[in-house]
Image (cartoon, helix red, strand yellow):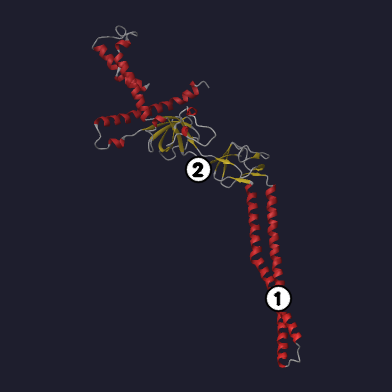
Amino acid sequence: MLELVFCSILTILPDYLFRRYVQDKRIGREITLYSVWYELRYGIVTCLILTVSLVTLIFYYHPTASSAVSTFRTIPILPESSGRVEEVYVPVQLETEVKAGDPIFRLDSSRQEANVDTARNQVTEVESELALAQSELAVATAQVDQARAALKQAQDELDTRTELMGRNANVVSQRDVEKLENAVAARQGALRAAESNQELIESKISISLPARLESARARLREAEVELEKMTVHAGVDGTIAQFVLRPGDIVNQMLRPAGILIPRDAQRQRIIAGFDQIEAQVLHTGMVAEAFCGADPFKIIPLVITEVQTQIASGQLNASGQLVDTTQAARPATITTIMEPLYPDGLETLPPGANCIVNAYTSNHDKLDESGIGTAEFLYLHMVDAVGTVHALLLRVQALLYPIQTLVLSGH
């Protein structure tokens, strides 16, 4: 409407003034309801052409996105395993503030507790075996000393008999010497067996049993971790919203989450808007924008575009059992852009998830400062920047009329 009024001032009004003061045609006589088209046809046609051109220019270089929302991140509250809820630590409220590490609920952990007891008993068993092995080592050491003493006694007796036989062959018989040699060999074998048994027990104490003990302790820690997983804690500071979980409910990782946790640092940070595809060549990072949100009326929020997604969602493909048919994407998708407040705390009063209307404005200030720009291009770029004021005015009119349209004229 503003564009039409502005263009009529430049076209229809001069045409009428020419008819009135040059041709002396007045409204109600020569210019009537039936002859107005014939009398003012040049001004009306020019007004329509100029209005359409102006509207096209405004909405192309200063695009509008009606599908904009103040986004916030949510974290599903899920246990690492399915189970039945045993106890809930969060009160029945619409919103509950929690700190990182606060317990939220606990699942039935009877099986995990039994696994912890079993693992703890295994640790105790291995520790008992280690203490028993220490006693066995003492016995094996004594056996080695005993075998070494027996070997020394047999060796000394053999040396004595051999020396006597060398002095006088009639004193000691050859048979006695052979018996002593066999006895020495037997005592040597007994000593080696005792030493091997001692080494085996030492290996068990230093290698085998410590390894088994560490494995048993690792299984105990694993069982304790599984037991701790039965209690779900808040991972970050935030708000638990609409938490309705109660003891006896079944929680499943795939089918039924326990609730939603809204992180405290994920609120009031950005607005995501979807612009029409025709503005793909106009949108770019760094564009200044403004947003009007119904949840915060009478307020225009200055924004800046920080990211523009280069892909359009309607063209995505994934592996499936059917061929792609382009008619299934009959509704064209929008160009997703991310906007952040131009000033600190610009979205502080805006509730997360609020729907907004966003205007983005093209600025040719840098191009106008370049040398060598032509006069026609200079005037055109000036006109593009100037008509952005009309779009900004329209956004403020919408902000003023929104409460009236919603509360009075909507019929609610």
Q: Indicate whether 385 appears above or below 46.
A: below
Q: Secondary structure at mark 2?
A: helix
Q: Position of residue 37 (x, y in %)?
A: 32, 11
| Quarter that holds the N terminus | top left
Q: Residue at x 69, y 61 (%)?
A: 126
Mark toward the start of the polypeptide (1 vs 2) = 1
**Who's the residue at 24% across and 36% down the image?**
372
The residue sitting at 66% across, 39% down in the picture is: 250
Query: Do the residues bearing badges 1 and 2 touch, measured as CB atoms within 8 Å?
Result: no
The picture places residue 405, in percent across and down from the top left corner, at: 47, 23
Judge from the rendering whether residue 340 lies leftward or rightward of residue 370; answer left or right. Answer: right
Q: Which residue is mark 1?
A: 189
At label 2, counting other C-alpha atoms closer than 10 Å, the crowd grade (few under 14, some 14-19, many 20 or more) is few
Q: Dot 1: what SS?
A: helix
How far apart in space, not on screen, are marks 1 and 2 (Cα)? Answer: 77 Å
Residue type marked 1:
Gly
